[in-house]
Amino acid sequence: MSVENLSVATSTAAKKGVVVIGAGLAGWHVIDAIRAKDTEIPITLITADSGDRYHKPMLTMAISQNKRASDLVRASGSEAAKTAEVTLLANTQVTDIDPVSQTVQVRSTAQSDDTLTTIGYEKMVLAMGAHPIFPKSLPQDLVWHVNHIERFSQLQEKLAAGSQHVAIVGAGMVGTEIAEDLLKAGHKVTLIDLNDAPLSQMLPAKATARIAKAIESQGIQFLGGYQVSAVTRVNNDDSEDGEKLQVDYAPLSTDADNTDTQPLEPLMVDHVIASTGLTVDEQLPAAAGVEFDRRTGIVVDATTLRTNAANIYAIGDCMSINGVACRYVAPLRAQAATIADDILGHDHSGYNHKPPMIRLKNKAISVMVTGVPQAAGNWQVKTESDDELVMDLIDDNEAVSATVTIKAPAVPKA
């Protein structure tokens, strides 16, 4: 963050502008929505990275397509900021928020000193997203995540050396998609999950069993019902660089009657990727005095997306509506439009949250989900054949609250 940018940011704030924290899809969507209706209001965008614009869902498909990080970037942060006429404070950390004086304190991570700068705001939008959860058994210095383009780029560089063995811990949507992408790129893949099948926290066993069968038929090794206890670096003479990662794991539940069970042989792999869920950092929500839930994120009003703190909004991965985290891309445009209208004082009908269609990007099997799925519940079979399974989740009022449709992939014509 340059002195010039700081000066511009301070000037911007003096004009009663908008401060957006976070330059992911959510943050840029808010800026786009505001600029579509007001080209004059000052906007300052603060981000811990470069602020480059890219479509994060593409990260789980890009390795097999041999796409570099540079291929995924639609515009650099500086280019996008110039186009949108916003002040970009890249590589900048927000250290504190004072909702009374309506100021934020920031420091540049690109400079060696710890000088803090205070920036004022009239309206603020928290769009800082969520970050990966790393259980103690998955040390961050040894384990990758694919939740940000910078880490994706670093992993891709390592994988470019040739076919390698990758263990993925967590078989939710992201873990299952990455597993297929790595396999298509020529790597050996082991997918490990606490549950007996992928997507088991979302869908019933009858549905997830089909998903497990499909990914295993591709050649992905799926270890369901296992918990990783440790990941350690070891020397290995068979590895070109002399080092491997040892993954120790064990059954989540053991058979008490089987006293002769032998310890499981550890996995020896080249890389480990954590796909064990997301969490929202509580530091800034706590500083801003906004209502916050450790599990789901910042609590917002369902209609306006305002927090309980005056003049502060939240959007995207970091927020929750009616106790449910909002971590899908599809609703972002509508969320941003509501926030823009509310900030600018325009009349609007309010945000109407509709759960988006969830679509697994794997080619081995087609999985589409509508509504709000949860594994536990009254799931009823609507259609069942070798090629298709359709199930409805029936709520306490006998209404359909979610539907899952699973189809075998179409066979290409000869």
Image (tube, grey):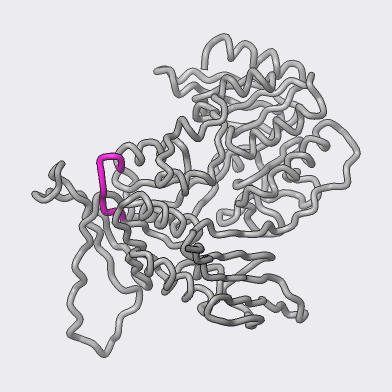
Residue 61: % across, % down: 47, 48
Residue 77: % across, % down: 56, 24
From this view, report whether residue 235 is shown above or below residue 161.
Answer: below
Residue shown at the point (40%, 57%) measured from the top left: 179
Residue nearest the observer in this picture, 115 or 23: 23
Residue 152: % across, % down: 41, 40
Residue nearest the observer in this picture, 137 or 73: 73
From this view, report whether residue 402 is shown above or below residue 297.
Answer: below
Left or right: residue 101 versus residue 134 is right
Residue nearest the observer in this picture, 183 or 379: 183
Please say whether residue 163 is one of the residues in the magenta stretch: yes
Residue shown at the point (32%, 49%) measured from the top left: 139
Please say whether residue 137 is one of the residues in the magenta stretch: no
Left or right: residue 338 versus residue 1 is right
| Residue furthest to the front | 414
Residue shown at the point (59%, 34%) measured from the top left: 22
| Residue furthest to the bottom | 257
The span shown in magenta is 159-166
Q: Main secondary structure of the magenta part?
A: loop
Residue 142: % across, % down: 29, 46
Q: Is residue 95 visible?
A: no
